[in-house]
Image: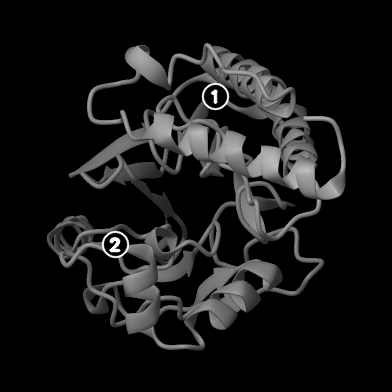
Amino acid sequence: MLTQVAEGVLIHESEFCQSNAVVVQGGAGVLLIDAGVHEDEMRCLVSDLSELGHAVVAGFSTHPHWDHLLWHGGLGTAPRYGTARCAATARDRLSGGVEAVAKAAGIPEEVSLDLLGLITGLPADATQIPWDGPGIRIIEHQAHAPGHAALLLEDRGVLVAGDMLSDVLIPMLDLNGTADPIEEYFTALRLLEDVAGDVDAVVPGHGSVCGADPLRARIDQDRAYLHALRDGKDSSDSRIGLSAKPGWEWVSDVHAGQLQRLRQRRERNGTPV
């Protein structure tokens, strides 16, 4: 089921981790961002778009994690884009075969992997998505995943945040691809804060859509979490522990894992824990 969040902007929410696929209406068709997850949900999205008379003319993946690289044959053969670094990372991770990726990532059987990761990297200096529709600014950063992009729909007042600014997920760091993952995340939050004044609605990759005031609150919450993480302290963040949303208790395990790996990093580098 498609739900409108702004003029010409609709979302399709998956049962898998409350994932949000974003549909942006353009002149000749729609742009589909982070298309979806389970096979039956993808078929539902195909049906919804068909009933509305919308053809998909372009796709975009915000970052190179498997749940943001999916596609369905019923959506057609429109070009699918990502940042240059996102596309290169996806190619590298899929070089050993889709089955290896599925096994390593624990991808559910309900997910069709036939068209996984078939994206084209935009030029490294690209700042706009090339399509016949409203201007969409690419805000690239290296928090969470290589070549991660948030997208600002400038005349619709919508920020598509990728896997950031969630009400159910804590900041999840890229602990493999960056020398200072916490600082990279702080940098990304500053980039998103810089455009907050132009935003009326925020669509996270996972979680609830929010407005301008909750956006700033989510930025503050993420910063507070990162400060605690950097200092090696337990966090009072409401997204972990006993206050976590039912069904999201596993996020506490993610937090514990991040604390442990950052502590190990400091020990290897000889810095204070």
Q: Nearer the viewer, mark 1 or mark 2?
A: 1
User: Residue 260, position in %: x, y?
Assistant: 59, 38
| 57 sits to left or right of 160 | left
| 133 sits to left or right of 70 | right
The amino acid pointed to by label 1 is Asp
| 80 sits to left or right of 135 | left
User: Residue 109, position in %: x, y?
Assistant: 17, 67
**Residue hosting label 1:** 200
User: Residue 220, position in %: x, y?
Assistant: 65, 16
Task: Determine whether the residue tagged by mark 2 lies in a helix, strand or loop.
Answer: loop
Give the class, few, some or many, for how many residues have Cα within 10 Å of label 2's Cα (few <14, many ≥20).
some
Give the class, few, some or many, for how many residues have Cα within 10 Å of label 1's Cα (few <14, many ≥20).
some
Look at the numbered discs 1 and 2 and tell me whether their residues touch, using CB distance below 8 Å: no
Q: Residue at x 44, y 24 (%)?
A: 167
Q: Tell me which numbered mark, 1 or 2, is placed earlier along the sequence.
A: 2
The mark total stands at 2
Q: Residue at x 54, y 57 (%)?
A: 62
Give the quarter of the figure containing the N terminus: top left
Task: Determine whether the residue tagged by mark 1 lies in a helix, strand or loop.
Answer: loop
> 55 or 168, which is in the foreground?
168
The amino acid pointed to by label 2 is His
Q: Residue at x 66, y 17 (%)?
A: 224
**Residue hosting label 2:** 54
Residue 52 vertical placement versus 208 (above, below): below
User: Residue 124, position in %: x, y?
Assistant: 78, 70
> 207 or 101, which is in the foreground?
101
Task: Using the numbered discs, state the Cα–Cα distance from disc 1 to disc 2 in whole angstroms.
Answer: 25 Å
Give the quarter of the figure containing the C terminus: top right
Residue 256 vertical placement versus 149 (above, below): above
Badge number at residue 226 = none
